[in-house]
Amino acid sequence: DYFPSRPGEFENFGDIRVTNKSLQHSRFGVSKRVLEVESPGHEAFGVEHFQYSWTDFGVPRLVEPVLEIFKELYKLQPGCSYVVHCRAGIGRSGTFITIDHILRRIQSGDLSAVSVADVVQYLRQQRGGLVETSEQYWFCFRAIIKQLECFLAQK
């Protein structure tokens, strides 16, 4: 691991210190850690780290855990960067990135983003193999539909 697992613990990586400030677990199995990163000569900064496990080449049974992460990401300040990763960086990460890409475009009023096939094809130009399985492809649809239902229910 590249972070301490328990609140109050820290790990040093060369002259960089990472401290786990807090840990929360959601009912859907999403873990949220608040980490503090310190390095001599630099201002300390915080990192919100979300962790959710689903099987390689598979999809979660429910879309809610993934949508829960998006809900937290959308609370971040505009322009904040985030990193998404899995083991190979194309299956689970690609599924997450595809859903995020489409939802953000829809929220900005771009309804041309509704074509999952077009978005996956576009993203694959940047990272070959993104969204590895048909199950992951269909999971994108399920998550997007569920999130759109939530958007409509709020209006």
Image (cartoon, rainbow, N blue to C red):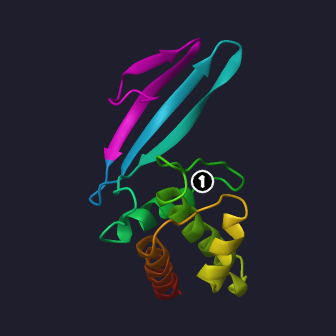
Q: How many marks?
A: 1
Q: Indicate yes or no whether the magenta region holds residue 108.
A: no
In the structure shown, which secondary structural element does the residue marked by tag 1 occupy? loop
Tell me which residue sits at (47%, 29%) in the image.
Answer: 2
Task: Specify whether 30 is left or right of 151.
Answer: left
**Highlighted range, magenta:** 1-24
Judge by depth and name the residue closer to the eye, 127 or 72.
127
Name which quarter of the figure residue 73 lies in. Answer: bottom right
Task: Give the answer, above or below, for where 15 lies relative to 38.
Answer: above
Residue 33 image position (x, y, % from top left): 42, 40
Report which residue position mark 1 lands on: 76
Label 1 environment density (alpha carbons within 10 Å; few <14, some 14–19, many ≥20)? few
Name which quarter of the figure residue 24 lies in. Answer: top left
Residue 80 image position (x, y, % from top left): 67, 49
Judge by depth and name the residue closer to the eye, 67 or 24.
67
Residue 53 image position (x, y, % from top left): 35, 52
Task: Specify whether 123 is left or right of 24.
Answer: right
Residue 15 image position (x, y, % from top left): 59, 11
Tell me which residue sits at (37%, 21%) in the image.
Answer: 9
